[in-house]
Amino acid sequence: MLNELRASANTYTFSKFLGLTSSFSLVFVIDVSNRLQPLVGMIRTVTSQLVNSVQNLSTKPSNYILAPFNGSHWGPIHVVTKINEFFDLIESLNETKLQHSSEHYYDALNGALKTCESESVAFFFTDAPSHEPCPQGLTRALARLKNTKIDVLFVNSSQSTSETISELNHFAVTTGGLFINIDITQPTINGKFIYRRLQETLGY
């Protein structure tokens, strides 16, 4: 039976089926709302730092996934295989390029989770949860299915409420990820944190 499966698939797919590959995705889901342009600028700086540091990883991400969104639209989901291409995508981020109307606050994140490899590392950049309560069940189920932890990198603002922080903290914890308040004026620190999480994915 295994020989038949191997004959019907390529070597990579067959190896992945047996759990013999260490492929994973680096996923950025970014709120690109106009009010968050300083955040997008910080992410560009962080990604430029990652271009060099990722080269030092013994196993590099097999692909890089970018999923932009704002309060009303999301997508498209971008998938590239080189960190330089990932950086170029982030450089060109603009909320006017979003294509799909949002029916759910986590649409972009759900799309990224459906696309990524198993055991990936995902970062969700935002400053607010949905304007109204939004079910998280599908997103948590996808995260469990892909064995992917989601770190919420939260930009605190004068408009942030304790309910906002509580909702996003609960979301991160239930996926096995972390909730982190980030300072957008400290791209070097944020970049080191993201790189450290990449290392942890590889077992460092």
Image (cartoon, rainbow, N blue to C red):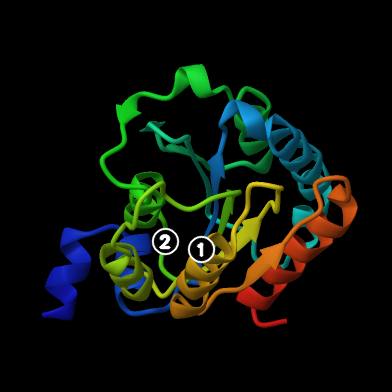
Residue 150, x across and y down, in percent: 52, 66
| Count of all numbered marks drawn on residues in the image | 2
Tell me: residue 74, above or below residue 159: above
Instruction: Sort mark 1 into few (<14), some (14-19) or many (20+) by Cα contacts within 10 Å.
Output: many
Tell me: residue 33, above or below residue 21: above
The image quadrant where one finds the C terminus is: bottom right
* Circle 2: residue type: Glu
Residue nearest the observer in this picture, 132 or 40: 132
Residue nearest the observer in this picture, 109 or 38: 38
Residue under pointer 1 = 24
Q: Earlier in the sequence, mark 2 or mark 1?
A: 1
Residue 35, x across and y down, in percent: 64, 30
Left or right of 157 in this view: 82: left
Q: Is label 1 in a helix, a strand or a loop? A: loop
Q: Residue at x 17, y 79 (%)?
A: 2
* Circle 1: residue type: Phe
Residue 117 badge: 2
Q: Is label 2 in a helix, a strand or a loop? A: loop
Q: Residue at x 35, y 75 (%)?
A: 144
